C-alpha cells in the first residue's frame, strides 16, 4: 500500500537502530508499533521473532493488524469448504451489487447526483460492495470465524486500494480512470506470518490512551509528522473496512465523523501529546521516527526526550515520498531521524 509515511523503504535502517541502540540480549522481546499504519514495521519484527503489540487509531489499519500481526495460524475456512466454497475464487466471481461504495464513489452511482465521483470504476465499485456484503453475511451465518472475517476484510481493503482511481490518497480522485483503476479488482490472500510461541496483539485506540495499559521493551513511535490527516486521506479504506453507511461530505465524500482527528497533526498540540506518550510509556527503549520537515522541531524532540533518560539521534538521507515530489520543493531528499531514548 502506498501509504503516507510508510516505513517500507527504511525497515533495515530501523532494524539497525534497534540493534545498535537497544543491544537487547533477552529472548522474549516485546515490541510495540503504536502508530502502525500499514503494519509493515510490525510484520518485519514479527518475522524477526519479537512479540508484537500493534495499534492504530484507524479501523482499517487495525483490521490489517488483526489479519497479519495478531493472527498467528493458517486459516482453514472449514465451514465454507465443507459446502464446496473456496472463499477467494467465490468472492472474486460474485455478481456486482449497488451498495454504498457504488452509490457514492463510482461514476455510474453518482452521475445523476449533485456531486459526481469516480474513485473506482463502476465494475470495481460494484464488486467491492458485493464482496463486503458477502463477508458480512458469512459472519452472521457463522460460516467464517472472527479471524477469517478480519482476514477477508483486510484482503478487500488491500485489493480495493490497488484499483483506486487516485493519485495516492483519497482526498481527490482523478478525472479519467487511470490504467490500474481500469483493471478488474482481484481479491488475493494476504501473506500470513506464523511465529510459534510468541504473542501478538492488535489494538484500535488513541496511542495516548493505550500507552497507560501496556508495557514492554521497545516502543516504536511513528506518528503523523505534518498536518496531512490520515482519517481524511484514507477515509475510503475506513469505510470499506467498517461498512457503516457513514454520513459523508464534499467533493471527495469524506466521512463527517471527526472522532479520529489526531493531535499529532496539530502544531499547537503535537509536542504535548508526544511528551505525554513518552512520560506514560512503560518501556525501556523508545524510538521515534520523525523527519526533518515535521511540525515538531528536532530541538524540541531532543529536549523532551532527554528529560526522561539517555537520548541519542540517528539520521539517514531518505528519498522523498512520491506524491510530495510533485510539489515545488528544491530537495529530492528528506532526512529520516530516529530519536532514541533509554528510559
Ligand atoms: C506515519 S503513519 C505510520 C506509518 C507506518 N509506520 C507504516 O510504515 O505504514 C502514522 C499513523 O498514525 C496513526 N495515528 C495518528 N494519530 C494517532 C493516535 N493518536 N493514536 C494512534 N494512531 C494514530 C495514523 O492513522 C497513521 O496510520
Image (tube, helix red, strand yellow):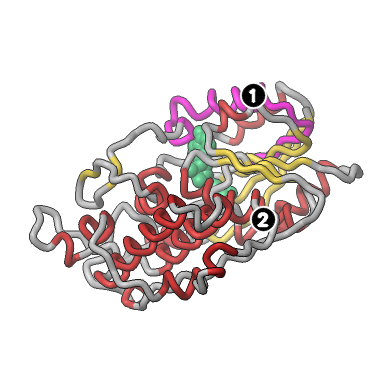
**Image location (x, y in percent) of residue 51:** 76, 45
Mark 1 element type: loop
Query: Ligand 1 within 8 A of label 2's CB?
Result: no
- Residue 327 appearing in the image: no
Q: Residue 43 shows which numbered tag?
A: 2
Residue at 64% in and 24% down: 212
Q: Residue at x 15, y 59 (%)?
A: 110
Q: Secondary structure at mark 2?
A: helix
Residue 179 in percent (x, y) is at: 34, 78
**Real-space Cα separation, disc 2 to disc 1, in angstroms:** 24 Å
**Residue 245 relative to residue 24: left or right:** left
Residue 339 got which mark? none
Residue 286: where, in percent of width, then height? 71, 35
The tally of labels here is 2
> Label 1, on which residue?
212
Return the residue found at the far front: 83
Q: Which residues are magenta?
A: 263-288
Amino acid at each position: 500500500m502506498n501509504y503516507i509515511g510508510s516505513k517500507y523503504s527504511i525497515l533495515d535502517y530501523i532494524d539497525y537502530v534497534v540493534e545498535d541502540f537497544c543491544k537487547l540480549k533477552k529472548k522474549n522481546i516485546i515490541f510495540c508499533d503504536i502508530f502502525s499504519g500499514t503494519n509493515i514495521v510490525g510484520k518485519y519484527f514479527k518475522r524477526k521473532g519479537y512479540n508484537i503489540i500493534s495499534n492504530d487509531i484507524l479501523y482499517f489499519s487495525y483490521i490489517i493488524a488483526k489479519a497479519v500481526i495478531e493472527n498467528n495460524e493458517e486459516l482453514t475456512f472449514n465451514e465454507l469448504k465443507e459446502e464446496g466454497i473456496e472463499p477467494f475464487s467465490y468472492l472474486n466471481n460474485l455478481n456486482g451489487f449497488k451498495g454504498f461504495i457504488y452509490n457514492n464513489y463510482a461514476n455510474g452511482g453518482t452521475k445523476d447526483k449533485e456531486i459526481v465521483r469516480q474513485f473506482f470504476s463502476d465494475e470495481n465499485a460494484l464488486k467491492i460492495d458485493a464482496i463486503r456484503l458477502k463477508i458480512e453475511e458469512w459472519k452472521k451465518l457463522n460460516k467464517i470465524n472472527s479471524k477469517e472475517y478480519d482476514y477477508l476484510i483486510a484482503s478487500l481493503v488491500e485489493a480495493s486500494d490497488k484499483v483506486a482511481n487516485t493519485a495516492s490518497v483519497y482526498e481527490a480522485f482523478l478525472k479519467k480512470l487511470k490504467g490500474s483503476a481500469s483493471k478488474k479488482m482481484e481479491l488475493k490472500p494476504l501473506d500470513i506470518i506464523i511465529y510459534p510461541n510468541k504473542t501478538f496483539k492488535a489494538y484500535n485506540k488513541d496511542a495516548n490512551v493505550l500507552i497507560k495499559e501496556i508495557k514492554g521493551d521497545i516502543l516504536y513511535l511513528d506518528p503523523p509528522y505534518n498536518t496531512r490527516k490520515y482519517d481524511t486521506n484514507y477515509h475510503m479504506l475506513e469505510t470499506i473496512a467498517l461498512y457503516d453507511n457513514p454520513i459523508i461530505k464534499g467533493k471527495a465524500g469524506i466521512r463527517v465523523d471527526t472522532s479520529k482527528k489526531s493531535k499529532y497533526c496539530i502544531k499547537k498540540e503535537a509536542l504535548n501529546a508526544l511528551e505525554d506518550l513518552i512520560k506514560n510509556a512503560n518501556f525501556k527503549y523508545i524510538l521515534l521516527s520523525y523527519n526533518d520537515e515535521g511540525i515538531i522541531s528536532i530541538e524540541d524532540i531532543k529536549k523532551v526526550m532527554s528529560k526522561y533518560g539517555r537520548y541519542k539521534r540517528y539520521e539517514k538521507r531518505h528519498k522523498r515520498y512520491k506524491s510530495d515530489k510533485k510539489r515545488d520543493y528544491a530537495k529530492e531528499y528528506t532526512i529520516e531521524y530516529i530519536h532514541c531514548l533509554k528510559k
